[in-house]
Amino acid sequence: MTGYLKCWYDRLPLAKKIAYPNIAVTFFFSLILIAGSIRFVQVHMEEGLEQRIHEYQKGQVHRISNALERLRENLKEVARQPRMISAFHDLDSAFSHPDSGGSLALAQGFTNRSWRGVITPYRRMHGQHDTWIEKHITDLGVQDIYLVNDNGDVVYAQSKDGVFASNLISGPGSNSALAHLFQDMRDGVKPNRVVMTDVSAFAPQNGTPSFFAAVSLVDGNGKRVGYMIARINAFILSSLVNTGREIGSTGQSYLLGRDSLLRTRVTGQPTWGALKKYFPSRPYASSLKGNSGLTRHSGTDGSRMVTGFTPIMTDDIHWILITEAAASEAFAAGRTGRVVFIFAALLMLLSCAFLAMRRIGQDIAKQLTKGPDAPDHVKDIERIECQIKTLRIDLARLLQKKERNQHLSRQA
């Protein structure tokens, strides 16, 4: 095969002998340039995706922080209302009234049919204030409000769940986040401060992931008379975090706690995700120390991912906001035009370079030959000489093979 190629090359005019290697070299370096250009565009677009994730996270942190601050301010405003103080006094007094039948009777009075027709002092007070408190629950966007006296008695709960009419110090809910929050409030928190807990499973609501916010009830004399505690379902956090598709169809954000458990859902998971173990361990490690950053890594399916992480820190909680998207989102709709333009410009540049190198090679060849190509009869002679050379090579190979076979026969 090498002999035939050599003959073919020898028969080429001198101009082509010079032009073809130039074309080959130009083509080779063009491939390298195309590969480098693709990599450059990929890195450039991924940097743009990182910037979008960074800006998106800044907006998300602002959104979540503002939502929590609005909740704090709204709770303070409700707790300061004279009617809330009056409702607490009425319900607290009726709770301890002898005719109310005690804590067990109060709890059963809203769940047991045998108590439904019994009118007690507590039922009368409850009827006066329940609708008004329920309206505030709706306006605040919370799931329940608990009114607790200084002894730890839950004198009101709109849902009438397992902690209603119980004691948060000695009752069945004494180990819950609600009870711990009450004890923290009672042990020295300033009356004008709203204290929040992290997300945890709340047993009286079938383990629903919830967090709590508490504020003191203060009378006209500045004396703390009780506590108002709101229960917020962690679904609200998911609605705050998982609202954006600004980073693409594969983009999603979620909150993580210091215990490495999720506080919000993860798209595509069979369950909504709160209080489930977080699977990638890389991105959030430095965020536990208050750092923000971006990282590129392989996802669970092997795809290339870009992940941003940033802390959300208050006096009461420390969450980590994680935002991730497939690196392919860098080429998503809306930016495709710019990518196509860049590739088109590169291809045009390479085509021009290719044609220019070919033209230069031909011009150089003409200058070197200084005359027309060889006549046809010269080309025929050269072709015959090449064929003769090829036949000699083939004959030599056959003779070598024959001698080797004779030698093997003599040995046998």
Image: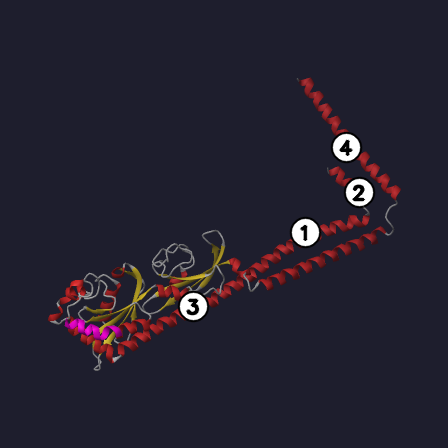
- C-alpha gap between disc 2 and disc 4: 17 Å
- Please, what secondary structure does the residue beneath circle 3 have? helix
Say if mark 3 contacts mark 2, CB within 8 Å.
no
Task: Residue type at mark 3: give it.
Answer: Gln
For this view, does 192 lie left or right of residue 47?
A: left
Q: Is residue 312 above or below residue 381?
A: below
Residue 10 is labelled as: 2
Disc 1: which residue: 28
Task: Residue type at mark 1: give it.
Answer: Phe
At 31% from the left and 71% from the top, the residue drawn is: 138
How crowded pointer 1 is (Cα within 10 Å; few <14, some 14-19, many 20+) is rated as few
Disc 4: which residue: 393
Q: Is residue 36 above or below residue 402?
A: below
For this view, does 173 lie left or right of residue 31?
A: left
Does residue 311 show up?
no
Q: Which residues are magenta?
A: 120-131
At 64% from the left and 56% from the top, the residue drawn is: 33
